[in-house]
Image: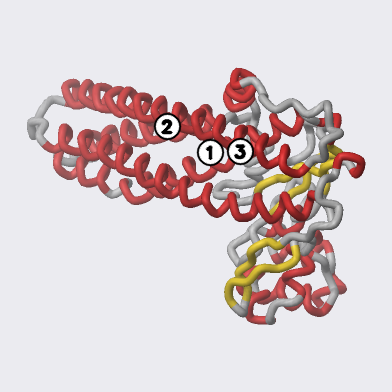
Amino acid sequence: MSSTQFLINAASRHAVLSQRYSRGREAEFQREVGRILSEIEGRMAVSRDGASTVRMMALREELSTAFGDAYKVAADKLFSTLEEFGLSEAGFTEQLLSKSISANAAEFSTAVSPDLVRSALSGEFLDVNLKSHMTIRSAIDKLGVNKSEEVSRLIKDGIVTGKTPIEISEAISETSSRTKAQAAAIVRTSVNAASSIASHTVYQDNKDILDGYRWVSTLDARTSVICMTLDGQLFSFDGSNPKPPRHWGCRSTIVPQVKKEFDKFSDVGGKRPSSGGDGRELVDSRTTYSGWLKKQSSAFQDEALGSVRGKLLRRGDLSLDSFIDPTGRTYSLQELEALNPLAFN
């Protein structure tokens, strides 16, 4: 065995704690965004019925701006929290790495500059959307811009169609559940990104003793197809290689691959948690998602992949990586059939 097994075990367990932390931050941000929407709804509802179109249009601009300003305050607070979390994750990663390397790894730097971590958290682009360059902060800000524009549009549509202020307020209220869900997704993805970026920064700073980093996905039915295929893969520190989050709500993580000459745990095994058809259990840390899924029941495979893809996998007609395109997008069944007609006969 190697330090990789030790690190996968530790990282898998730590990821559970990170997800728990994320749920707390999601709830906080949801409450704040919900409060902002409620204030906008209230101000709209008490505005004078029968006010002139000019006055209502002015109110529209006022409320749209008010939402944007209040959201920015919430976004600033969230990003500050994520920075603190990222610095904590960098510290955890340093400790974990120090425990897995031998004493002759003299090149190891025990303290990555906090400024280096902050810079990475502010500047690194996320892999969630390869068509647009988004950082953690710009992803958070984009939700605020979109919601501010939506509030403005709802008020304008209400004015044009002759709705009363209360009816317009109710239209804004109807977006609340969706907005809160989007806010939660933003936070969940940002927490994962902060952890991933911080860890990767530590790894890069110690690449003289590392062969790269290895992708670790969650072994359960909720994992995306792209993360299923990436699990266990080893990547170099080339900036073009993927890092979590690979999609919105991604739960994957990465661990360093220690060079053999610096490997402290050459004779130590490790485990990683899984949640399959037989419930929760620990499996060998060398287990990849693909190998683990093949050992699961047909019902579990169908739950994870869908019945058609599950059947294709069981028959051996297609492998997991056949279900995604080069960008990581999952092919629709129609696309899969067009690309692999014999597998569907």
Q: Which of the pair 126/195 is nearer the observer?
A: 195
Please report the residue visible at 70 percent of the width from the left and 27 percent of the height from the top: 110
Measure the alpha-carbon separation of dots 1 and 3: 18 Å
> Which numbered mark, 3 or 2, is in the foreground of this view?
3
The reply, left or right, for residue 173 in relation to residue 87 is left
The reply, left or right, for residue 306 in relation to residue 28 is right
Please report the residue visible at 13 percent of the width from the left and 38 percent of the height from the top: 45
Residue 31, position as x, y percentages in the image: 30, 43
Amino acid type indicated by mark 3: Phe
Q: Are marks 2 and 1 in contact (CB under 8 Å)?
A: yes
Classed neighbour count for the residue bearing mark 1: other residues with Cα under 10 Å, few (<14), some (14–19), many (≥20): many
Q: Which of the pair 10/161 is nearer the observer?
A: 10
Counting residues from the start of the chain, the first of labels 1 and 3 encountered is 3
Would you name the residue on which mark 1 appears?
190
Task: Give the secondary structure at mark 2.
Answer: helix
Q: Are marks 1 and 3 in contact (CB under 8 Å)?
A: no
The image shows residue 279, relative to residue 321, as above or below, that is below
Would you name the residue on which mark 2 appears?
78
Amino acid type indicated by mark 1: Ser
Counting residues from the start of the chain, the first of labels 2 and 1 encountered is 2
Measure the alpha-carbon separation of dots 3 and 2: 21 Å
Residue 320, position as x, y percentages in the image: 78, 63
Quarter of the figure that contains the N terminus: bottom right
Counting residues from the start of the chain, the first of labels 3 and 2 encountered is 2
The image shows residue 230, relative to residue 159, as above or below, that is below
Residue 21, position as x, y percentages in the image: 46, 46
Would you name the residue on which mark 3 appears?
92
Task: Give the secondary structure at mark 1.
Answer: helix
Amino acid type indicated by mark 2: Leu
> Which numbered mark, 1 or 3, is in the foreground of this view?
3
